[in-house]
Amino acid sequence: MAEEIDQQVYDDLIAQGKSERVATAKAKAAAVRQQKQQQAAEEPAQQAQPAASSPPAGDGGQAGGQAAATMAEAGVMTPEQRQERVRQALQAKQGETGGQAGEKAPSAKFAGQEHTHRLLAMVPPSGIQQIRGKQEDKVYTWPHLISSEFIALMAVTAGLTVMAVFVNAPLLALANPTNTPNPSKAPWYFMGLQELLLYFHPMVAGVTIPTVMLVGLAAVPYVDRNPSRRPENRKTIIVAFTVFMVFWAVLVMVGSFFRGPGLNWVWPWVDGLWFAL
Amino acid sequence: MSRIPNADDVKKGVQDNVIWKSIFRPGSIYRKGYRDTSRDRALAAMNNVLYHLHPVKVKRHGLKLSYTYCLGGTSFFLFILLTVTGIFLMFFYTPAAGSGSEIAYADMQDLSAAVPFGSFVRNMHRWAAHLMTLTVFLHMARVFYHGAYKPPREFNWIVGIVLLLLTLLLAFTGYLLPWDQLALWAVSVGTDMMGYTPVFGDQVQFVLLGGVQIGPETLLRWYVLHVLALPFVLTIFLAVHFWRIRKDGGISGPL
């Protein structure tokens, strides 16, 4: 098969001064192309063949006759030829079922049966459960998620163990209500509020602001009605939240590291730290 | 017995008996005959107590560390770690103070000096507490930036805010228990502010302190809050939080 080449193409290319290698390759390719074209032309004819019992126009109608039509002719049948072929095929079928009349033929198969189908139930369209979820890219929790969670908790435990071995939790002198240390600082997570105490009345800094903050945070999903979760569609609220977080982080940092005795401003690298965890 | 049992014989003996089979349900990786097939992977999740937390399958993008940073899971794990270390500390601590009977502070000194691993466990409890406060904050930020509070997850965001508040209260009540100068005065700064609550300021402060200023009654009150009342409430909200995660369709996203 692979040896077949198109001799004419080969000769032409040699005459054009191409090398033998190129000419052989192109001639082979041409031969393969020709073969494929031939096959493509044969296929529709072959498909038509089993059904086609029609003789070519000149042969005269012989019912159920041999497929005498050549492939080329089957590919280009006229409408009249097609109708003739169908008529002959139907005649042949009636012959098989005992030559009954044309209208009776379809029901002959069910002769003697009282019902041809049975109604089991009527189902209204609304009664069919419709599942609208779309296929999602999912993986098995075990082992994929569980193993990564296990690694994460091992890492946290390892980090905490190292910290606990090398850094001791502070324990100062016994509590003494009559001896106020200078400065007295809240735990770091309340340091932002303590910093605000320097600027506002205690009721504002200690009660109003934290309450407004908590209620405001809880109200976020009901205030932000933007349905999109994509960052590019929610720039405003992302900027607002980031400003809020940075503002608190700065307050906590300032309160923790930049406030010394009397809660006055200090530079931690000059005056030292007044901070305990 | 003519030959020495090898590892497979031992494994078979351990796994192939009624007690082992009664403990590990079908699909457990510890049960005899576990194979790494889709069916057994599904059963391993479904027939495990962790099925309360995780469904059989999860969205692939949720596995990426850069999506969750494991912050919620780490917070929950720290809560468990804090419970375990906290129970250990409770064995050696008495919430009693007052002139002439400074038992709480004496217990703290003993914990560091005399109790085996006392100092280590106390350190771990304290650092884990600070870390948990941080991870809960960061978890909230992560959820915000992913817009994961949007429908249908609005209510779970509120539950999360309650959990944040409870975490802060747990950290704050625990801060008083060592009964040293740091504890007393750090807590004073906070409780002084409560007195400025409009209308009921004095009453709020009185109930929380068990008196007009921080004293032995405050210590007992905050101890009970710290080891019993607040963890109880937090556990209930945690259960709701986890349940809603699954009911609201698992992890949010992809973006």
Image (cartoon, grey):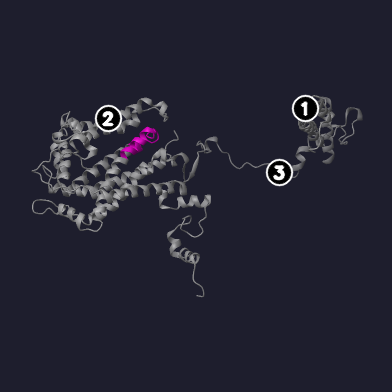
| Nearer the camera: disc 3 or disc 2 | 2
Circle nearer the N terminus (3, 2): 3
Mark 1 and mark 2: Cα distance apart in space? 79 Å
B129 and B124: which is toward the camera: B124
**Label 3 packing within 10 angstroms: few (<14), some (14-19), many (20+):** few
Mark 1 and 2 residues: CB-CB less than 8 Å, in contact?
A: no
Can you say whether B202 is above or below A8 in the image? Answer: below
Q: Quadrant of residue B131?
A: top left
**Badge 3 amino acid:** Glu
Query: Callout 3: residue from which chain?
Result: A
Q: Is residue A171 left or right of residue B150?
A: left
Q: Residue at x 35, y 45 (%)?
A: B74
Mark 1 or mark 3: which comes first in sequence? 1
Toward the viewer: A104 or B210? B210
The residue that disc 1 covers is A18
Chain label for disc 2: A
Label 1 neighbourhood size at 10 Å, few (<14), some (14-19), many (20+)?
Answer: some
In the rendered view, would you say A164 is above or below B8?
above
Label 3: which residue?
A114
**Quarter location, residue B208:** top left
Q: Which residues are magenta?
A: B136-157
**Is B234 situated left or right of B69 in this image?**
left
Tags 1 and 3 in contact by the CB under 8 Å rule? no
Res B22 quadrant in image: bottom left
Select label 1 or label 3 by which is in front.
1
- Quick one: SS at disc 1? loop
Q: Residue furthest bottom?
A: B2
| A231 magenta-colored | no
The dot on residue A247 is 2
